[in-house]
Image (cartoon, coloured by chain):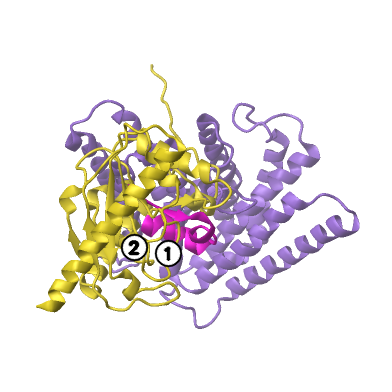
Chain colours: A purple, B yellow
């Protein structure tokens, strides 16, 4: 992916833009018919839909503006996501730990943006993979520096989960922007995890009987989950123009990663919210909750997909 | 094993635009950082552009909560009084600002919250509620409340009549109140002007007093208001006299 504005629009980019536009238009017409003609109450879905009308163009704009903007945009999402997590857990009261995690996210972004000093490739891969070592070391130093013990294990643990999961694992999505196939990878991932969500919801509504994980997310059903998995297994074949160099094995793995990983990411944020006793992580996007409520699946999927791709094709 | 306790903030499910209007506010790292930068910028501006000078800073109590009352001539007043507070107390100093003006729109709320740390004060319907908020603030040791008891900016530069709220707030409490007078603000940035002129600003801080011995009654409230108004005017008179002296020489 080029550093700045793409002079010529990638055909993959154009295809996704048209498909997304068509889907949004179609959904808008369906909502309008339901609401205006059939007089159903569609207000809450309408708010969610309006959220999409804002978010979808933002994604395409960031990708159009190039690698640097995309990576910085993903870093902003990581910062926003961590901020919500820190507030919800109460970690935000301690500025040493939150400051250290923000520093870690800044480091993630920096090593993603620079060139590898050894071979000149985009993104300093070795340092990226080593970063958790340094950030965790920094976090463990904080209680020592402040000569404090009481309650520090909780703060250190919350910070490590916050950095590793919400900063570093999610940051793999940014690192993907360094690939020459970045547009295809990123657009496919975003598109696939969101459709995976929709598929789980729809299949759950249509066939749902048995609860999937009753203690974590009582509204999800086993049937919905399996339906979403089946849908996600098919999607890479349908959208194989996103990665023309993929063989059958990669397409199957991509389907598994999105189908299973996406739902695990969803359930991960759900169990965190359940433990904290809150409904939404934030109130940033009307109809969608917070950043984390929106990108929960991507956090889980991005690093798995990244390492799968790197194993077979390099970046 | 002991269970972890989580302490999410009280405003967790509010959107950030609602949080900007909330009071009292939850501490927020980024707001604090921006406010510190804004305070440094405002202090620099006052010092360089208005040759700002503070006299009697030693009268500010070193610890505990206190109230600063001052004459109100311009939008430079709150930044000038804040500039007298040590930077370490910046986030605990709250100028009371009219809710109907300073918290009317989102950009204004953002500015009032982030840069000024303003306390939204209802001038009309819920004045008593706003006073209760002020009282709760002062019950926490270490908070500084900045009040302009005239309730609005003076049109001609003269000190207007102090409203009764300040008297009701202070009667029967040991909380020290520090009278202040800012001179030059009317010339620098009168009501209606849209950009400040480079006139000199001088802030005079008088001696603190408190009204623990006075019960909250109609005449004591009136007396407190009159006394504080006289204090502020006296500081202003002293400022005028020294200005005249300077001119005579």
Q: Which residue is mark 2?
A: B77
Mark number displayed over residue B153? 1
**Up-down relation of residue A4 to residue A215 (above or below):** below
**Label 2 marks which chain's residue?**
B
Residue drawn at the location 45% of the way across and 69% of the way down = A180
**Label 1 marks which chain's residue?**
B
Can you give x and y, in whole percent of width and height, for residue B42 in the image?
29, 65
Can you give x and y, in whole percent of width and height, for residue A224 in the image?
71, 39
**B113 inside magenta stretch:** yes
Residue drawn at the location 64% of the way across and 27% of the way down = A214
Secondary structure, mark 2, is: helix
Can you give x and y, in whole percent of width and height, for residue B75 in the image?
38, 66
The answer to whether B159 appears left or right of B203 in the picture is right
**B186 inside magenta stretch:** no
The answer to whether B223 appears left or right of A18 in the picture is left
Residue drawn at the location 54% of the way across and 54% of the way down = A250
Q: Say which of A119 and A273 sits in front.
A: A273
Q: Is residue B127 visible?
A: yes
Residue A122 falls in image quadrant: bottom left
Q: Is residue A232 visible?
A: no
Q: Nearer the viewer, mark 1 or mark 2?
A: 1
The answer to whether B175 appears left or right of A184 in the picture is left
Q: Are marks 1 and 2 on the same chain?
A: yes
Q: Say which of B97 and A19 sits in front.
A: B97
Can you give x and y, in whole percent of width and height, for residue A293 in the image?
56, 46
**Up-down relation of residue A254 to residue B239 (above or below):** above
Q: Which residues are magenta?
A: B93-116
Q: Are marks 1 and 2 in contact (CB under 8 Å)?
A: yes
Q: Say which of A190 and A36 sits in front.
A: A36
Secondary structure, mark 1, is: loop
**Number of residues whose C-alpha sits closer than 10 Å to that of mark 2, classed few (under 14), some (14–19) or many (20 or more):** many
């Amino acid at each position: 992916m080029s550093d700045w504005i793409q002079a010529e629009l990638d055909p993959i980019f154009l295809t996704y833009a048209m498909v997304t536009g068509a889907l949004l238009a179609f959904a808008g017409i369906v909502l309008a018919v339901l609401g205006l003609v059939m007089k159903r109450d569609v207000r809450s879905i309408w708010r969610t839909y309006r959220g999409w009308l804002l978010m979808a163009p933002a994604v395409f704009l960031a990708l159009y503006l190039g690698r640097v903007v995309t990576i910085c945009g993903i870093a902003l999402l990581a910062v926003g996501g961590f901020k919500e997590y820190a507030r919800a857990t109460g970690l935000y009261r301690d500025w040493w730990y939150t400051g250290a995690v923000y520093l870690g996210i800044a480091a993630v972004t920096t090593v993603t943006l620079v060139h590898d000093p050894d071979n000149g490739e985009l993104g300093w891969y070795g340092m990226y993979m080593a970063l958790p070592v340094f950030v965790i070391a920094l976090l463990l130093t904080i209680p020592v520096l402040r000569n404090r013990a009481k309650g520090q294990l909780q703060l250190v643990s919350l910070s490590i989960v916050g950095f590793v999961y919400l900063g570093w694992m999610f940051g793999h999505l940014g690192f993907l922007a360094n690939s020459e196939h970045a547009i295809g990878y990123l657009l496919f991932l975003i598109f696939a995890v969101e459709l995976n969500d929709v598929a789980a919801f729809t299949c759950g509504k249509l066939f749902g009987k048995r609860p999937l994980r009753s203690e974590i997310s009582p509204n999800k059903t086993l049937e919905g989950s399996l339906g979403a998995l089946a849908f996600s297994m098919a999607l890479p074949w349908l959208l194989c123009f996103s990665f023309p160099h993929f063989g059958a094995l990669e397409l199957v793995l991509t389907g598994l990663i999105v189908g299973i990983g996406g739902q695990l990411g969803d359930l991960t944020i759900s169990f965190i919210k359940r433990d904290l006793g809150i409904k939404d992580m934030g109130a940033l996007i009307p109809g969608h909750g917070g950043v984390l409520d929106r990108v929960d699946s991507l956090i889980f999927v991005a690093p798995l997909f990244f390492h799968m791709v790197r194993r077979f094709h390099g970046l | 094993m002991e269970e972890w306790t989580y302490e999410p903030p009280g405003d967790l499910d509010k959107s950030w635009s609602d949080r900007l209007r909330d009071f009292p506010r939850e501490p927020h790292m980024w707001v604090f950082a921006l406010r510190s930068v804004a305070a440094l910028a405002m202090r620099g501006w006052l010092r360089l552009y208005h040759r700002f000078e503070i006299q009697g800073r030693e009268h500010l109590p070193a610890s505990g909560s206190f109230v600063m009352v001052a004459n109100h001539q311009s939008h430079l007043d709150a930044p000038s009084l804040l500039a007298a507070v040590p930077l370490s107390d910046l986030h605990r100093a709250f100028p009371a600002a009219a809710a109907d003006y300073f918290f009317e729109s989102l950009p204004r709320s953002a500015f009032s919250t982030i840069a000024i740390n303003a306390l939204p004060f209802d001038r009309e319907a819920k004045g008593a509620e706003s006073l209760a908020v002020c009282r709760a603030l002062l019950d926490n040791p270490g908070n500084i409340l900045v009040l302009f008891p005239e309730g609005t900016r003076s049109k001609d530069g003269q000190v207007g009549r102090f409203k009764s709220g300040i008297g009701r707030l202070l009667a029967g409490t040991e909380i020290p109140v520090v009278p202040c007078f800012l001179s030059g603000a009317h010339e620098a940035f009168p009501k209606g002007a849209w950009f400040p002129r480079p006139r000199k600003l001088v802030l005079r801080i008088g001696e603190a007093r408190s009204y623990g011995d006075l019960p909250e009654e109609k005449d004591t409230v009136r007396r407190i208001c009159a006394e504080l108004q006289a204090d502020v005017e006296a500081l202003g008179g002293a400022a005028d006299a020294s200005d005249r002296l300077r001119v005579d020489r």
